[in-house]
């Protein structure tokens, strides 16, 4: 009598291996997407900080506000990358590296916001334009996250 279990066993092992490899590669892709999203978010935060730091008077505030469209697109790309991560978290090394970069950046950002808002807030038109750009950033992030 011929052993019919061998072909089934081989087929089962093959399908099991394929399923395992597919799930591992999906997890690896998700983790890579999470790491990319975190790294990109640091870069975009740096860009936003530099944009705010460039505000020294009403003219530079207007120029900075005009550049916020590009910033909105960058924030949307971060949201797209985060969505690809599907809830996966970056590895511990990436988190530690990010926290190391973000600590001084948060301090800079705090100072930049206070300084920039003193100038922007003194002009109702600038304030309205700034708020509209902030709303645009939020809308683009939301749109990218729900695609």
Image (tube, grey):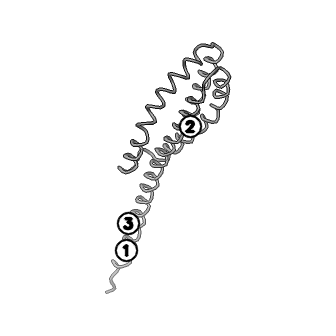
Q: What crowding class fits label 3: few (fewer than 14 Cα within 10 Å), some (14-19), or many (20 or more)?
A: few
Q: Position of residue 90 (x, y in %)?
A: 40, 48
Task: State whether residue 18 is above or below residue 35.
Answer: below
Q: Position of residue 20 (x, y in %)?
A: 39, 63
Q: Nearer the viewer, residue 100 or 133?
A: 100
Q: Position of residue 66 (x, y in %)?
A: 67, 28
Q: Nearer the viewer, residue 145 or 52?
A: 52
Q: What crowding class fits label 1: few (fewer than 14 Cα within 10 Å), some (14-19), or many (20 or more)?
A: few
Along the horizontal axis of the image, is 12 left or right of 65?
A: left
User: Which residue has dot 1 on it?
Assistant: 8
Numbered disc total: 3
Q: Mark 1 or mark 2: name the one nearer the start of the chain.
A: 1
Q: Nearer the viewer, residue 7 or 56?
A: 56
- 3D distance between C-alphas at marks 2 and 3: 46 Å
The secondary structure type at the circle numbered 3 is helix
Q: Residue furthest front?
A: 56
User: Which residue has dot 3 on it?
Assistant: 16
Q: What crowding class fits label 2: few (fewer than 14 Cα within 10 Å), some (14-19), or many (20 or more)?
A: some
Q: Are marks 1 and 2 in contact (CB under 8 Å)?
A: no
Q: Quadrant of residue 86?
A: top left
User: Which residue has dot 2 on it?
Assistant: 47
Task: State whether residue 6 is above or below residue 37.
Answer: below
Quarter of the picture holding the N terminus: bottom left
Q: Are marks 1 and 3 in contact (CB under 8 Å)?
A: no
Q: Nearer the viewer, residue 82 or 101?
A: 101
Q: Position of residue 147 (x, y in %)?
A: 56, 39
- 3D distance between C-alphas at marks 1 and 3: 12 Å
């Amino acid at each position: 009598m011929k052993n019919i279990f061998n072909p089934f066993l081989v087929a089962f092992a093959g399908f099991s291996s394929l399923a395992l490899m597919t799930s591992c590669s999906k997890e690896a892709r998700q983790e890579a997407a999470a790491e990319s999203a975190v790294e990109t978010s640091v870069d975009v935060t740096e860009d936003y900080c530099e944009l705010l730091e460039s505000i020294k008077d009403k003219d530079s505030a207007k120029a900075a506000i005009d550049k916020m469209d590009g910033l909105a697109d960058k924030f949307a790309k971060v949201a797209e990358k985060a969505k690809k991560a599907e809830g996966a978290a970056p590895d511990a090394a990436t988190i530690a590296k990010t926290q190391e970069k973000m600590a001084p950046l948060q301090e800079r950002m705090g100072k930049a916001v206070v300084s920039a808002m003193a100038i922007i807030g003194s002009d109702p038109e600038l304030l309205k334009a700034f708020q509209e750009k902030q709303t645009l950033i939020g809308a683009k992030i939301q749109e990218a996250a729900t695609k």
